[in-house]
Image (cartoon, rainbow, N blue to C red):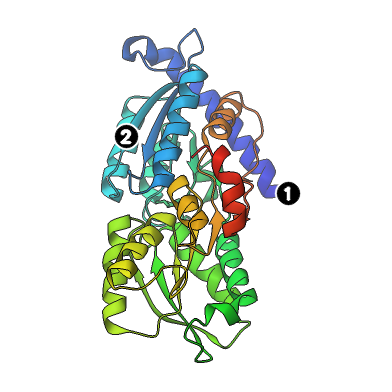
Amino acid sequence: MVKKTLVAATAISLSTFALTSCGSSNAESGSGGDDDGTITMGFAQVGAESGWRTANTKSIQETAEAEGIDLKFTDAQGKQENQIQAIRSYIQQKVDVIAFSPVVETGFDAVLQEAKAAGIPVILTDRAVDVEDTSLYETFLGSDFVLEGEKAGEWLVENAKEADVDGDGTVNVVQLEGTTGAAPAIDRAEGFADKIAADDTIEVTASQTGDFTRDGGKQVMESFLQSDDSIDVVFAHNDDMGLGAIEAIEAAGLEPGKDIQIITIDAVKDGMQALADGKINYIVECNPLLGPQLMDLAKKVLDGEEVPERVVTEESAFTQEQAKEVLPDRQY
Ligand code: GYE
């Protein structure tokens, strides 16, 4: 309770400061907060590593355009240092608000303090940062990644018998992790491990990062297949790595979805198609369409309105039958 009030008070004072400082300097710089009230947002994106990210970028760009928000957009190509550099440049340009999706959880304290000192509010979207001082950002909009991992684990526990493809009494799982140190990689692994602990026939026998990319998933899966012929299940932290794993499994002469079952997270079109085709067995949804909620939060923060510290997106999960039903209307 106390914390919430404090955060709200900070939001008001920060935005007042931001608007004041914009009023005095923006005429020359041409950035937002001008007399016509145009908001300038600096957005530091992770990169273009996956179908999810492409849909996320599109949602942010399209919403900004529709709402008349002047969006300055950078792609960090998966590198934290690029992202920090982009945020610093937004501070220099005196944008009204900064939003970003942190590549990894740690290491952002200094740059967030610089934004705070400059009076520029920061909104985290999609991924969280691990900082002690939560007043360094206004709010965090994104999925509950632990819950996503839990949903994947629960499905496997419920389907453990069928998932023991070679029938040897143990369900051998290999895990394709997301980017090392990224919130979705850490949290999805944690949620999954928590749930599969309920069944001692399920065992994670190998786990390695595929960096959330199709190519990364393929390469790691190739090496797993070379060293282990008893793999029953792949748990991939996103669809793209699962799609890469499908290529590796097929190249090894095995049938994905049958000889080796596959569970992924995201539910982007290519993933859902593979699910409907029987090559993936279960997908947990992670919604990338964060643009509308992000722009709404930015406006509220700049108007000095109170915003929740955490905004969680609503998501579901799909079986093969359900994928066939929803695919025709899927937006991403
Ligand atoms: O699941 C993955 C992307 O942070 C939720 O990042 C996002 C994840 C998403 O590369 O596909």
Circle 2 residues within 10 Å: few <14, some 14–19, many ≥20: some
Q: Which mark is residue 201?
A: none
Q: Tell me if residue 39 comes above or below residue 274 in the rendering.
A: above
Query: CA–CA distance between discs 1 and 2?
Result: 36 Å
Residue name at image x 57 percent, y 52 percent: 323
Q: Position of residue 41 (x, y in %)?
A: 43, 27
From the Cβ of disc 2, is ligand 1 less than 8 Å away?
Answer: no
Element carrying mark 1: loop
Residue 178 visible: no
Residue 119 picture location, percent across and down:
46, 31
Residue 112 against residue 246 in the figure, above or below: above
Q: Which residue is mark 1?
A: 1
Between discs 1 and 2, the one toward the N terminus: 1
Q: State the residue position of label 2.
A: 74
Q: Foreground: 156 or 111?
A: 156
Give yes or no for contact between labels 1 and 2 (Cβ–Cβ under 8 Å).
no
Q: Dividing the picture into quarters, in which one does residue 13 lie? A: top right
- The correct choice, above or below, for 247 with respect to 314 in the image is below
Regarding residue 255, the answer to whether it shows in the image is yes
Quadrant of the rendered structure where residue 116 is?
A: top left
Q: Quadrant of residue 319?
A: bottom right
Q: What amino acid does circle 1 point to?
A: Met
